[in-house]
Image (cartoon, rainbow, N blue to C red):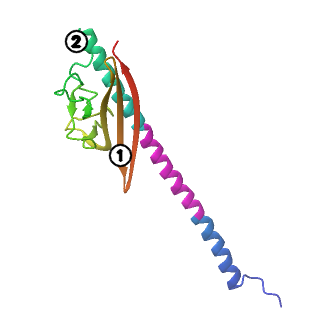
């Protein structure tokens, strides 16, 4: 008489193969989600850094249009917020420059839930991003602007740093 069923060993092997396939798939999905989140955060950090450059460039241009020194209110003398060696923030909404208490101590950016804008408005929701702007003098007509955007996800700290030279024109 022939038995027409699975033995217990055949069933265990089939279940083991099925479990391995499910674990492999779920681990690939988890890895893809982690990569997506990192990529999204890195893109936001890139644009926040670009916005920092644009704000300093805009303040330089505004000074020129008002016939002031090109670094007026930015880094003309040691009383200015972004004076060489100091870390500072620039609010993209109000164009207010503020000195941080030290390098690596700038406050976190906040985001308006309605518009999606980033800034330092206390009424907005805090984000995981901080933006720090530092300036270095190259010569009388050129400065180096370094923008560092930092963020943390659980125990992992990330940083996007970019540098651009700005001329007195």
Q: Is residue 37 left or right of residue 80?
A: right
Q: Position of residue 103 (x, y in %)?
A: 27, 41
Depth order, front residue of 92/20? 92
Q: Is residue 33 magenta?
A: yes
Examine the rendered structure and indicate whether residue 58 appears above or below residue 37. above
Examine the rendered structure and indicate whether residue 141 appears above or below residue 94. above
Q: Which residue is mark 2?
A: 68
Q: Magenta stretch: give its range.
A: 24-43
Q: How many marks?
A: 2
State the image quarter where residue 45 is shown.
top left
Which of the two marks, 1 or 2, is nearer to us in this view? 2
State the image quarter where residue 119 is shown.
top left
Q: Position of residue 84 (x, y in %)?
A: 26, 30
Q: Earlier in the sequence, mark 1 or mark 2?
A: 2
**SS at mark 1?**
strand
User: What's the magenta bit mostly, secondary-structure-wise?
Assistant: helix
Depth order, front residue of 36/165? 165
Q: Is residue 77 magenta?
A: no
Image quarter (top left, top right, bottom left or bottom right) of the N terminus: bottom right
Q: Is residue 52 left or right of residue 33?
A: left
**SS at mark 2?**
loop
The alpha-carbon separation of the residues under discs 1 and 2 comes to 36 Å
Q: Is residue 29 left or right of residue 66?
A: right
State the image quarter where residue 63 is shown.
top left
Tell me, for residue 22, which label it has, or none. none
Q: Which residue is mark 1?
A: 151
**For mark 2, does the 10 Å Cα neighbourhood hold few (<14), some (14 to 19), or many (20 or more) residues?**
few
Q: Position of residue 163 (x, y in %)?
A: 40, 31
Q: Position of residue 141 (x, y in %)?
A: 33, 17
Residue lying at 68% horizontally and 75% vertically, measured from the top left: 14
Image quarter (top left, top right, bottom left or bottom right) of the C terminus: top left
């Amino acid at each position: 008489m022939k038995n027409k069923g699975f033995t217990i060993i055949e069933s265990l092997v089939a279940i083991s193969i099925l479990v391995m396939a499910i674990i492999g798939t779920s681990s690939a999905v988890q890895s893809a989600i982690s990569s997506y989140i990192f990529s999204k955060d890195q893109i936001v950090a890139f644009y926040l850094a670009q916005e920092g450059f644009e704000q300093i460039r805009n303040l330089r241009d505004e000074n020129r249009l008002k016939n002031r020194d090109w670094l007026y209110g930015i880094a003309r003398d040691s009383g200015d917020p972004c004076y060489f060696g100091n870390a500072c923030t620039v609010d993209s909404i109000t164009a207010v420059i503020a000195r941080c208490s030290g390098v690596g101590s700038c406050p976190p950016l906040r985001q308006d839930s309605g518009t999606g804008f980033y800034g330092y408005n206390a009424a907005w929701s805090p984000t995981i991003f901080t933006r720090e702007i530092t300036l270095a003098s190259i010569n009388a007509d050129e400065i180096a602007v370094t923008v560092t955007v930092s963020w943390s996800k659980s125990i992992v700290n990330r940083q996007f740093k970019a540098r651009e030279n700005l001329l007195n024109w």
